[in-house]
Image: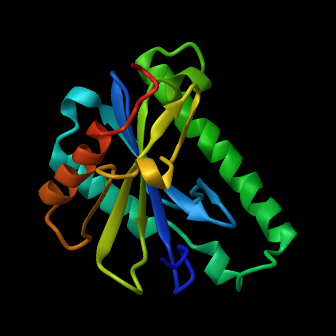
Amino acid sequence: MVAPGANGIVHYAHLIRTRKYVAVISMDNRGGSFFSVSGWSTFIDRKEATPEWIGENLKKALETSRDLFMEWGGYPLPQEKIDAEHKKSAPLYMEFWTRVQERYGFKDWRDAQTKSALVFVCWEPEQTDQVRFAASKGRGTNHSAWYSNENHGKVFHTSFNASNQEFGDVAIRALNVCRPNYL
């Protein structure tokens, strides 16, 4: 298996589900996956999050995700550019999570992120139309991928060209096999 990005641009997004909301977050690649400066990120009440809404918004998040690793020419990444992106990304990240906190009555922005299920979404548009949905396991206040020997039944694929409904259905299947922090 080739590492993501080895054959071209990679787009990332996160899909998060809690008991109160569902969020779709565009992530930029800059030597790691970070809250996107210009990408599509949004949230909605969980009871209103239809498969079609999830599919439509995940596609927007992936399309607007940037691969700065490829844009900047790979390693070594220029530290001044990483620092500049972080200065733009950090306040947007805080603004997004503060809005979630205020909308759903969490005690702080960190609490708004915990007690959730998360799916890592990855797409290499220059290589394939297939999008990878990897369910995560909760680890207290964060999430991680499953070890490869635990991965069976936790990774899903579908075409970026699938209907929003079909795309969202696959995303929900991935959410359903997560080990969320709220159990």
**Quadrant housing the C terminus:** top left
**Residue 122 picture quarter:** bottom left
Number of numbered markers:
0
* The furthest residue to the right: 80
* The furthest residue to the front: 149
Q: Position of residue 63 (x, y in %)?
A: 40, 69
What residue is rendered at 39% in x and 80% in y?
125
Which colouring convention does the figure follow? rainbow
What residue is rendered at 34% in x and 82% in y?
128
Q: Is residue 43 left or right of residue 75?
A: left
Q: Position of residue 1 (x, y in %)?
A: 48, 77
Rendered view: 156 above or below 7: above
Rendered view: 131 above or below 51: below
Rendered view: 98 above or below 119: above
Q: Is residue 90 left or right of residue 104?
A: right
Using the image as rendered, state which of residue 89 and residue 13 is in the foreground.
13
Q: Is residue 58 left or right of residue 182?
A: left
What residue is rendered at 29% in x and 50% in y?
153
Q: Residue 128, can we see it?
A: yes
Q: Position of residue 179 (x, y in %)?
A: 40, 33
Q: Residue 25, can we see it?
A: no
**Residue 98 picture quarter:** top right
